[in-house]
Amino acid sequence: MAAEDSLRFHPEVVSDLREAIGWYSEISQDLANDFRQVIDASLGRLVANPELYPHAFDDVRFVRVRTFPYLVLYKNMNEVPFVLGIFHGASDPSKWRQRASS
């Protein structure tokens, strides 16, 4: 089963990914492909053990993306991780909170 089959996603996650992949593509297509792969691996780790990761705030947790300065923010909803966003680690945390409350 693919990681995505065991997750739900906020509608803006697609935009998050497009923006990040687009940025890395401008540098190198190989770098963009590497980013895609580590995001997929991060989602797989999340599905395998959603309770393992620390809280960012309230009931929102995060998975640190390996090699890249990104975080996958999520919360468990009815025992299914709901991915709120894929954010650069230096982005404004108020953006994270806003997404979590929507």
Image (cartoon, grey):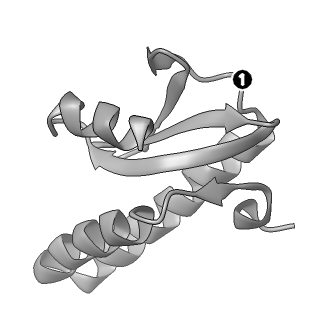
Q: Is residue 4 above or below residue 102?
A: below
Q: Secondary structure at mark 1?
A: loop
**Rendered residue at 30%/38% (across/down):** 98
Please tell me in which quadrant of the rendered image residue 47 appears: top right
Residue closer to the observer: 34 or 57: 57
Quadrant occupied by the C terminus: top left
Quadrant occupied by the N terminus: bottom right
Q: Amino acid at mark 1?
A: Glu
**Rendered residue at 45%/69% (across/down):** 36
Extreme residue toward the right, this view: 1
Q: Is residue 27 left or right of residue 70?
A: left
Q: How many marks?
A: 1
Q: Can the viewer see residue 68? A: no
**Rendered residue at 31%/75% (across/down):** 18
Q: Is residue 66 left or right of residue 90?
A: right
Q: Can the viewer see residue 35? A: yes
Please tell me in which quadrant of the rendered image residue 33 appears: bottom left
Please tell me in which quadrant of the rendered image residue 91 appears: top left
Q: Is residue 2 above or below residue 74?
A: below
At which x and y percent is residue 78?
80, 37
Q: What is the crowding at mark 1: few (fewer than 14 residues within 10 Å), some, or many (at least 20)?
A: some
At which x and y percent is residue 42?
56, 49
Residue closer to the observer: 34 or 60: 60
Determine which residue is flagged by label 1. Answer: 51
At which x and y percent is residue 81?
69, 42
Extreme residue toward the front, this view: 102
Q: Is residue 44 above or below residue 3?
A: above
Residue closer to the observer: 78 or 33: 78
Q: Is residue 56 left or right of residue 9?
A: left
Q: Is residue 34 left or right of residue 91?
A: right
**Rendered residue at 60%/55% (across/down):** 41
